[in-house]
Image (spheres, helix red, strand yellow):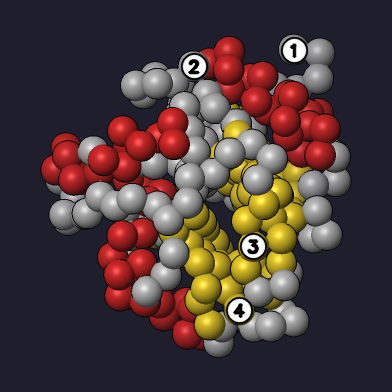
Amino acid sequence: MKIAVIPVTPFQQNCTLLVCEETMKGALVDPGGDVDKILSGVEQVGVSLEKIFLTHGHMDHAGAAGELAERLNLPIEGPHIGDKFWIDSMPQQARQFGLPPVRSFTPERWLNDGDQAQFGAITLEVLHCPGHTPGHVVFFNRDARLAQVGDVLFQGSIGRTDFPGGNHDQLIRSIREKLWPLGSDVVFVPGHGPLSTFGDERRSNPFVRDGV
């Protein structure tokens, strides 16, 4: 599996194109906006899109999912149903931030901890990691040692928990009990900013480093 990160929206959110090199099928993780930019990136890579995966329901991560699903006839999988209120409120979120209108939607499949999400010949493990939002999930590909962590963890930081439904203690537990056991060698794509590894964050992240 290879990836292409496509920063979208004024929040510079990392929409990720996942590519199954065996089948040249692709999936989008967190298409938050800028539909034409996303589709241009997909065309450059030359894959056929199969699915949309969502880590959570905030507008900067899910804002373009409904439009893309309708235009390309793609199923949406994720997040956990705990984020239904965020997805339902996306039109209001867009107005609040002065952004172009977005549509709410109902995913074809809500995801739970321990589920598998698949596209092409690739299998992603689903981990429910609440804290930033109640229904946040992380996607992990064991073969590639790669995790899509949304806004749970960043290089040198962690997700905000001051939004409705956020919980700081829950977020810390999600990171330490769900992410760290996957292995220090795992590379993760955060929702914003540069990639890092769980090992680097365990050593240096002031919020969740070992011994804190």
Question: Local crowd at mark 4 within 10 Å, few (<14), some, or many (≥20)?
Answer: some
Marked residue nearer the N-terminal end (4 or 3): 4
Residue 144 image offset from top left, x and y in percent: 79, 60
In the rendered image, which residue does mark 2 sit on?
A: 167
In the rendered image, which residue does mark 1 sit on?
A: 212
Q: Secondary structure at mark 3?
A: strand
Disc marking residue 118: 3
Between the residue at mark 4 and the residue at mark 1, the CA separation in whole angstroms equals 42 Å
| Image position of 17 (left or right of 59) | right
Depth check, mark 4 against mark 1: the one in front is 4
Depth check, mark 4 against mark 3: the one in front is 3
Marked residue nearer the N-terminal end (4 or 2): 4
Residue drawn at x 73%, y 24% as measured from the top left: 176
**Any part of residue 33 in sight:** no
| Image position of 128 (left or right of 30) | right
Marked residue nearer the N-terminal end (2 or 1): 2
Vertical position of residue 133 compared to residue 87: above or below = above
In the rendered image, which residue does mark 4 sit on?
A: 25
Residue 181 image offset from top left, x and y in percent: 82, 32
